[in-house]
Image (tube, helix red, strand yellow):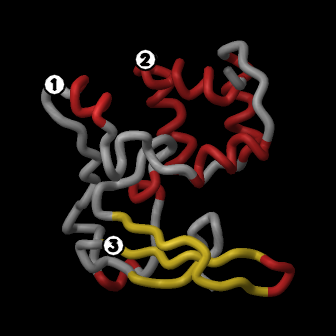
Amino acid sequence: MSQMTAFIEKAKSDGELMEKLNALGKKNAGPDEVIALAAEYGFTVTKEEIESARRQSCPHHGKLTEEDLDAVSGGWTQNRYDPAVCKPELGRTRYECLGFLCWCDHLRVENDVGTIGGGTKLSRYICDMGAFNYIGGNAGQPV
């Protein structure tokens, strides 16, 4: 198991660590701050691992396998929609759309819709509640 995977698993079971990660995400902290937090908990992670984890959706987002369905008791949702904030003038994703580990249920990302200079791949970011629909880079920044 990679250090990043182990760190994420720890965060899922440690409310205090998850609160710290969410606080870093809300203030749009850089990878160095996440690396320092991981080190506090005994994990060694890299910037590349952090960016990779941020680009991946929550394992419960999307289709469930038969094993997932067998294991379900209750349900899973990451509905972060807030009508006071998620308005069409928002124009782009924000931390609450992506979270640190799981995307909001209303976020859809269509990958590889084009490229820009240097071969940077573009994605379309769509809020099913109408807050945004735009093309951006892999970190969600509009182009």
Mark 1 near mark 3, Cβ–Cβ under 8 Å?
A: no
Separation of marks 1 and 2 at Cα, in angstroms: 18 Å
Question: Please, what secondary structure does the residue beneath circle 1 have?
Answer: loop
Separation of marks 1 and 3 at Cα, in angstroms: 28 Å
Q: Is residue 81 above or below residue 128?
A: above
Residue 22, image x and y in percent? 48, 39
| Residue bearing mark 1 | 73
Q: Is residue 114 above or below residue 99?
A: below
Q: Give the residue drawn at x 32%, y 49%.
A: 63
Question: Please, what secondary structure does the residue beneath circle 2 have?
Answer: helix
Q: Residue furthest front?
A: 66
Tell which circle, 3 or 2, labels the residue nearer the N-terminal end.
2
| Residue bearing mark 2 | 13
Q: Give the residue drawn at x 50%, y 78%.
A: 124
Badge number at residue 127: 3
Residue 89, image x and y in percent? 35, 84
Residue type at numbered disc 2: Ser
Separation of marks 3 and 2 at Cα, in angstroms: 29 Å
Residue type at numbered disc 1: Ser
Residue 23, image x and y in percent? 50, 40
Tell which circle, 1 or 2, labels the residue nearer the N-terminal end.
2
Q: Give the residue drawn at x 46%, y 63%.
A: 94
Q: Nearer the viewer, residue 65 or 97?
A: 65
Tell which circle, 1 or 3, labels the residue nearer the N-terminal end.
1
Q: Is residue 74 above or below residue 22?
A: above
